[in-house]
Image (cartoon, helix red, strand yellow):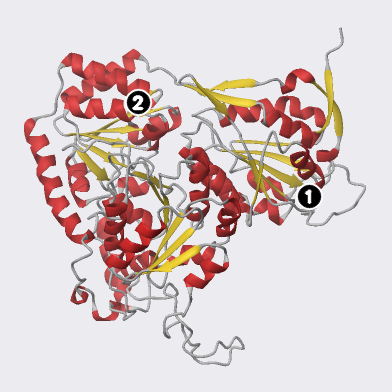
Amino acid sequence: MPTDTVRLTVAQAIVTYLSRQYSVADGQRRRLIPAALGIFGHGNVAGLGQALDQLSDALPFIQGRNEQALVHVATAYAKASRRHATLAVTASIGPGALNMVTGAGLATVNRLPVLLLPGDSYATRRQGPVLQQLQHPIEADTSANDAFRPLARFFDRITRPEQLLTALPQAMRVLTDPVDTGAVVLALPQDIQSYAYDYPAELFAERDWTIRRPPPDPDEVETVARLLAQAQRPLIIAGGGVVYSDATPELEALASSAGIPVAETFAGKGAVQQRAWWQLGGIGLEGTPATNDLAREADLVLTVGSRLTDFATASQSLFQHPGVRFASINVSPYDAGRLGATGIVADAKRALAALAEAVQRAGTTSPADWQERARARNRQWQVERAAALDPETPFDFSTLPPAERPDTGAVLTQGQLIGLLQEHARAGDVIIAAAGGPPGDLEKVWDATEGRLAHLEFGFSCMGYELPAAIGVRLAVPDPAKRIVSFLGDGTFLMAPTELVTAAQEGLAITIVIPENRGYQVIHRLQMLRSGREFGNEFRYRDGSLDLSGSATKPPRLEGGYLDVDLIKVAQGLGARALRAATADEVREALATTRDHGGPVVIVVPAIPHADLPGAGVWWDVAPAEVAEQEAVGRLRAEYEDGLATQRWHG
């Protein structure tokens, strides 16, 4: 008997297939890819554009302004959905496709699923070189989309309609695999998208994809339980895997019963929801000084769901106990062995539950003096934190070097603005940050317990993620009672503000809070620490006209007055309700009066440049020049080499 077939174009087959895929996690079934985003060009409008139009009831389409931003929307949606769902993104060939590359890198680095459908050059070649085609003189089959290969967790170029029979299921497998997930790229030649084929009707039946929870090996659990029993100063580091696995209750049970302090990475921010003595907060370069002091003293570090990048380990200089050992829980064998750890390769929720049971059965608890050390050091930090966030205490400019005291008229520090946002936050609200000073400051001081959620993308530290991420989170969390706030610097806002138009177009309630500190100030801070003078990071006019003829003896520098940029007008012009708030009371009023606004809101708050939160007290491996004419560089190089001596190899 012949198999029933359905005649569809390649693009129609893709859209139909995607509309019938479901994820199943912990008994909950949901659409795996409930919508598509994109910008049309000649490379996808006649193929995917036609299919999305014809099948819009099955797969709604969201129009965007920048392809990179649309990938960020989809990635943030996946993160807010705990990797149980994502969105598809389509772009035209050439620059449209390449605009998605940065977003692909972010998704893969952060282990977040996203489906990219870039147009590609013609599979047939009778047209000759087509518009936006990359012509490689040696590799004739190379296209711009090959740039995705090192970034994608799965890549395929569909040059025949029947290739979808294997490519589409494989793409879904990767999207729903906690170990392998990341950017999935199906490159679609412009002509092939419109080709018709008699597909088996069975391909388009609804299909469930189970998001597995691999169980832990009992022997691995017992080995780590013994390490905890032997430890005198144990520490847990909670990463994003705790959040994605919904393992917060199991983590809290282990920490509480065994008396183990818990630190959090950027991705793990909010992994602990209880307020307890063992809840420390951020670790590493932008962690709290209290957490880092305890990390230096720890003799056993149990990492859960983290890759342990150099920010978390202070470039391998943080863990200084001479006998420190490492254990880990990770669903990926690749990550489970970092720092030579004794690993439990399993789902974080199941592994933590098993480990907590083993620890309770053995009656293991950390020594009383270690618990008291954690309590005392954390109490000290909480006093310091409260002072830094208090918006009612005027900032003391005398604490800054004379050259670092610019008069911008701002009266609030970025830390004090965070204090006001913390004051306003309710359970269910989400604060988002990704690059520059905001994510580091939130990692250090934001209280992400009791439902005040933090969405920090720092695996890729990608400027431009924050605003589209708010759209993605809002799509995943449509409850208007839960406020979605993106906290981003003026530099990041000026780089990519255009998705405000998308938020306005879709009537999405998101709030963008911009501390206007007149520059790329977090890099300015690093620059001062590594070269001793400012260059090219503050937003200043050039002190004279720029002469590129080579005749000028000394080209004028960017050392004039601060740029006069009206961020309010920019935001209003892109469809947002925009307000400027300079004082603490004005910020409170702006937040209160816009909480129920039905579209995008932008609140601009002048922030004092160079007024930083208390330091984390750790070192970072960023090397000053070995030789330089500037006098300060030699001293800073010597300090850097002193830091090199603190690095350790663990493994």
Q: Secondary structure at mark 1?
A: loop
Query: Which element carries disc 2, helix, strand or loop?
Result: strand
Q: Position of residue 321 (x, y in %)?
A: 18, 40
| Crowdedness near tag 2: few (<14), some (14–19) or many (≥20) residues, C-alpha within 10 Å | many
Q: Dividing the image into 4 quarters, which one contains the C terminus?
A: top left
Residue type marked 2: Gly
Residue drawn at the location 27% of the way across and 50% of the way down:
287
Q: Position of residue 60 (x, y in %)?
A: 66, 40
The amino acid at mark 1 is Gly
Residue at horizontal 80%, vertical 27%?
162
Q: Which residue is mark 1?
A: 43
Image side of residue 587 versus residue 51, left or right: left
> Which of the two marks, 2 or 1, is nearer to us in this view?
1
Q: Is residue 255 above or below residue 586?
A: above
Q: Position of residue 50 (x, y in %)?
A: 80, 42
| 402 or 456: nearer the viewer | 456
Q: Nearer the viewer, residue 128 or 642?
A: 128
Which image quadrant is residue 253 in?
Answer: top left
Residue 285 seen in render: no
Q: Which numbered dot is residue 343?
A: 2
